[in-house]
């Protein structure tokens, strides 16, 4: 069995095809798909998808790329949505939250401050409710870590991880698993492939980030959760371990990172 720990199944790119896409993933033994929210306006959408589709779960949070147009009231709405979702077994984490210092203008000034504010407030919500977090990490590893050392959360997943080995170890030391997906399938992605081989298997989970981050064989077409076994095969190959062992280990790691998901399996 496989788990896609990060898939934006509600994205407009998928049109009305969510039912077929989730079913195609289930046919490839993708037992669970985690759908993170990105803004207040889609909290209801991701929850409704998870309620309707047999292999879907969801997270609630405000994505750093959506912080610019978010309001303080959205954090209050998020808290209320989390509070209500605690009774829903398909609700598994706070996310997608984090910091993006790659996009020009977001790495300094008021927008950076606003990003850090939303990240910190959402970490505090995760701590309050005892929930893991799904982290968006882009050129922001050290600042993300700084706040994680201060605000102790349950851990979670650093999604689409790209950083140094030392930064990876720091996330792992704080109880995080690292998400690997389509980027790893490109032979030129030397640093990501090196991490995928050198890090302990217990620290790795699989993700598509669909419709983004298409694997090499699909690029530039939209990524889909049914690609998880083939992405997993690349990781098994890089690590020279049997595919079944890789599937079992990454699914177990996802369950360890997301304890509410584990109770569903
Ligand atoms: Zn994402």
Image: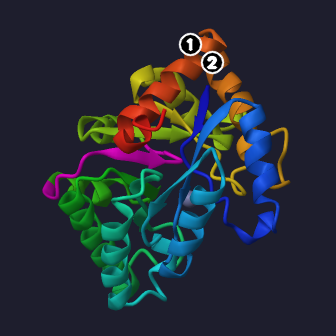
Mark 2 residue crowding within 10 angstroms, few (<14) / some (14–19) / many (20+): some
> Which of the two labelled residues, at mark 1 and mark 2, occupies the earlier sequence position?
2
Mark 2 residue element? helix
Residue located farthest toward the left when viewing the structure as drawn: 150
Left/right placement of residue 63 relative to residue 117 reads: right
Magenta span: helix, strand or loop, mainly?
loop
Mark 1 residue crowding within 10 angstroms, few (<14) / some (14–19) / many (20+): few
First to last magenta residue range: 150-163
Which sits in the foreground, 174 or 244? Answer: 244
Q: Please indicate, yes or no, whether residue 171 appears anywhere in the rendered image.
A: yes
Instruction: Residue 147 in the image: state x and y as whole percent.
Output: 22, 60
Q: Nearer the viewer, mark 1 or mark 2?
A: 1
Instruction: Residue 131 in the image: state x and y as whole percent.
Output: 29, 53
Residue 11 location, quadrant: bottom right
Q: Is residue 240 above or below residue 163?
A: above
Mark 1–mark 2 CB contact (< 8 Å)? yes
Mark 1 residue element? helix
Left/right placement of residue 242 relative to residue 214 reads: left
- Rendered residue at 70%/56% (across/down): 212
Disc ID at residue 236: 2
Question: On the image, numbered disc 1 is attached to which residue?
Answer: 245
The N terminus sits in image quarter: top right
Which sits in the foreground, 166 or 94? Answer: 94
Q: Is residue 139 magenta?
A: no
Instruction: Residue 69 in the image: state x and y as whole percent.
Output: 49, 89
Q: Please indicate, yes or no, whether residue 165 appears anywhere in the rendered image.
A: no
Number of labels in the image equals 2
- Rendered residue at 50%/76% (across/down): 39
Q: Quadrant of ligand 1?
A: bottom right
């Amino acid at each position: 069995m496989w788990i896609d720990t990060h898939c934006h199944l509600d994205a407009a790119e998928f049109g009305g095809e969510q039912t077929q896409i989730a079913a195609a993933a289930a046919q490839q033994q993708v037992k669970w798909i985690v759908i993170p929210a990105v803004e207040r306006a889609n909290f209801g959408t991701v929850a409704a998808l998870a309620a309707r589709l047999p292999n879907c779960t969801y997270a609630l949070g405000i994505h750093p790329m959506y912080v610019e147009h978010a309001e303080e009231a959205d954090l209050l709405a998020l808290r209320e949505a989390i509070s209500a979702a605690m009774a829903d077994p398909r609700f598994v984490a706070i996310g997608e939250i984090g910091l993006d210092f790659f996009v020009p203008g977001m790495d300094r000034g008021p927008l950076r401050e606003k990003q850090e504010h939303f990240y910190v407030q959402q970490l505090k919500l995760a701590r309050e409710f005892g929930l893991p977090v799904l982290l968006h990490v882009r050129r922001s590893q050290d600042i993300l870590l700084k706040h994680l050392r201060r605000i102790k959360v349950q851990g979670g997943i650093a999604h689409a991880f790209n950083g140094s080995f030392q930064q990876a170890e720091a996330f792992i030391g704080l109880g995080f698993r690292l998400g690997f997906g389509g980027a790893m399938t490109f032979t030129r992605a030397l640093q990501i492939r090196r991490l995928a081989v050198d890090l302990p298997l217990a620290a790795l989970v699989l993700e598509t980030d669909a419709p983004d981050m298409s694997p090499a064989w699909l690029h530039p077409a939209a990524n889909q959760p049914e690609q998880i076994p083939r992405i997993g095969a690349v990781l098994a190959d890089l690590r020279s371990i049997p595919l079944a062992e890789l599937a079992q280990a990454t699914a177990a790691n996802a369950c360890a990172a997301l304890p509410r998901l584990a109770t569903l399996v």
